[in-house]
Amino acid sequence: MLIMKTVLKSMKWLLLLSGIFVVILGITMLFTPLENLVTLAIFIGISMLISGASEIVSFWNEKKDNRSGWMLASGTVTALFAVWVLFGRGTEALTAILPFAFAVWVMSSGIMRIVGSMAIKSEGSNLWGWILTFGILGAALGFLLLFSPILSAVIISYSIGLMLISYGIDNVIIFFRLKKISDHIRDHLEE
């Protein structure tokens, strides 16, 4: 029982601290959106390096008969691209590409909603009009963002900032709920 209390106590304080730090990070993203795009590119590079390295390690950990050359090739290409992003000129290139990739994603999502609304209409659903409207708005926004990469970068940064703030607040709320649960457990055990 003592181990459970210790783990619960450690976990709840880590939740509180991480929640506070993540909220602060989210707020900074709201005030420095363009600089944070570079940070996002670096984060993507680090994630790709970890992914590539894990694929390479997985390849060598497999039995010889089960090894796939595609896994080794994928891991190698991913790791090399990550090294280029992190140590070459890739960070600048990725930072420049992200707003356009985001715009294409928003536009294609809108187009997919438009196509989906037609399929839903043929099934007789009343929701097709709403889906069509949001699809047209999404496609138009994506098209606008293609010609305004700074607006696209700001939207990316604000979206991530707001997600981080909500995640951090969630961690703080969980901290207080765990505190209430641990107090309840302690009171119950003392009875």
Image (spheres, helix red, strand yellow):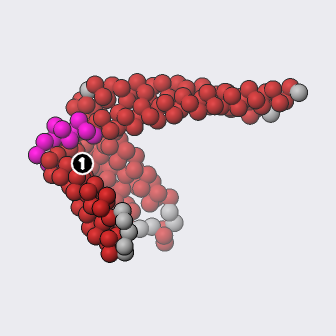
Residue 30 falls in image quadrant: top left
Report the residue at 26% width, 49% height from top: 81
Q: Main secondary structure of the magenta part?
A: helix
Image point (36%, 26%), residue name: 27
Query: Is residue 148 highlighted in magenta?
Result: yes
The residue at the far front in this view is: 126
21 or 167: nearer the viewer: 167
Instruction: Indicate the quadrant where residue 55 lies.
Output: bottom left
Residue at far left of view? 147
Residue sitting at x 86%, y 25% = 190
Residue 167 versus residue 80: which sits nearer the camera?
167
The quadrant of the image that shows the C terminus is top right
Q: Residue furthest right?
A: 191
* Magenta residues (range): 146-156
Residues 87 and 19: in front is 19
Residue 178 lies, in percent from the top left, at: 65, 31
* Residue 76 located left or right of residue 181: left
The amino acid beneath tag 1 is Phe
According to the picture, the residue beneath numbered tag 1 turns out to be 102
Q: Is residue 142 left or right of residue 72?
A: left
Q: Is residue 121 visible?
A: yes
Name the side, left or right, on which 26 lies relative to 35.
right
Residue 130 lies within the magenta run: no
Q: Is residue 100 above or below residue 108?
A: above
Looking at the rendered structure, the secondary structure element under dot 1 is helix
